[in-house]
Image: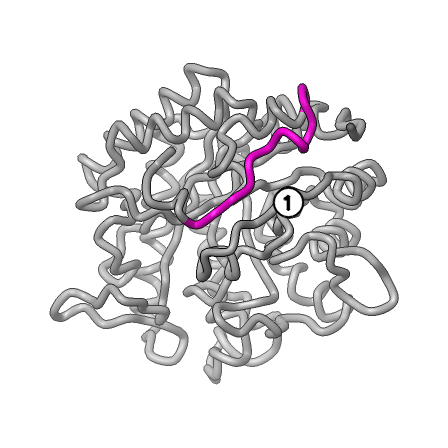
Amino acid sequence: MSNTHALFTPFTFKGLTLPNRIVMAPMTRSKSPGRVPGPEVAAYYKRRAEGGVGLIVSEGTFVPHPSAGFDPAVPDFDGEEALAGWKRVIDEVHAVGGKFAPQLWHVGMKVTQHQPLPGVVPMGPGNMTLQEIQDTVKAYGVAAKSAKDLDCDALEIHAAHGYLIDQFFWEGNNQRTDAYGGSIEARTKFAVDVLNEIRRNVGPDFPVILRFSQWKIPEFDAKLAHTPAELERFLTPLVEASVDLFHCSQRRFWEPEFTGSDLNLAGWTKKITGKPTITVGSVTLNEEFMTSFRTDTTSSVTGLDELLRRLDRGEFDLVAVGRALIANPDWAVRVKGEGVEHLRPFNRSLLAQLV
């Protein structure tokens, strides 16, 4: 059994103290009919808080904008009924000692099987006017204010995986010739505007997390930055816009981000910015998430030695666990008390209901 002490030490950022280094990764579940999280959603998150997760980051929630998202079972973070549902979630998580951060999301041009409502047009860097950009930025601010008003402990901005903010980041999508396009720094302007609007609504002391990735769906080899120097150019405007913590999304946490170093994306981000980081990607599972979601293959349980080695040396500060927490709501308790050999493997059949 590995020495897991590093996972279970408290961590403080921006005045928020977490009891350990374990984060529940945001995972879309599409279990909120009418875009309203019901009692079963509250119970789902409460079980993870009871199971020892230090910080719960919610599934992506749509900001109050007509084209934010099109799945009718993904929850909004706006409107009286949806916010009442989230208040229930937050209260139940807090009641068992957990901390909670909603993830704010706009899908941009990434429309899946759920089609837009009549008259609603998907928006991205290729077709957004300056007024539409301003309206979307304001929508993030409205959602952020709701998060603070509901007594959330932090919030996370979804700026990864090829959704709206990431569409502005990536030159493969962003061909604008105005202030929102061009250099890698200029392509961060939309995110910077969002961050500034959020900060205006929540104040200087509220913890703000930004999740970003190099890879996109389905462009798994895509790169925002090809070198550490490019990554620094990308991250600097975001730091200046007061990101408190970076959630650095990888499909496999152990993969080095650049040649010549075994640092992963979270490691490089922390080294460059000095900001705390979250790592993520196939923690205690042998299959990356897209494979396990698309096939009936069961993802086997793996050890924690490499993760703990990197955490011990300070490569990153927090560890986000995804599918393994679906299979094991008590993942943290099991790892601390019994070891990973007592974890259950993950199979996509577990997605059928909120366990």
Mark 1, secondary structure of its residue: loop
Looking at the image, residue 34 sits to the left or right of residue 340; the answer is left
Q: In x, y percent, where is residue 131? A: 30, 69
Q: Kindly identify the residue that appears in the image at 62 percent across and 50 percent down.
A: 282
Query: Which residue of the protein is positioned furthest toward the right in this rendering?
Result: 260
Q: Is residue 160 visible?
A: no
Residues shaded magenta: 336-348
Q: In x, y percent, where is residue 64? A: 27, 51
Looking at the image, residue 300 sits to the left or right of residue 103; the answer is right
Residue 103 occupies which quadrant of the picture? top left
Q: Is residue 149 above or below residue 106?
A: above
Q: Kindly identify the residue that appears in the image at 53 percent across and 55 percent down.
A: 289
What amino acid is labelled 1 in the image?
A: Val
Q: In x, y percent, where is residue 40? A: 29, 30
- Coloring basis for residues: one colour
Q: Is residue 342 magenta?
A: yes
Q: Quadrant location of the C terminus?
A: top left
Query: Which residue of the protein is positioned furthest toward the front in this rendering?
Result: 297
Task: Identify residue for label 1.
Answer: 283
Of residues 114 and 170, which is closer to you in this image?
A: 114
Q: Quadrant location of the N terminus?
A: top right
Q: In x, y percent, where is residue 284? A: 65, 42
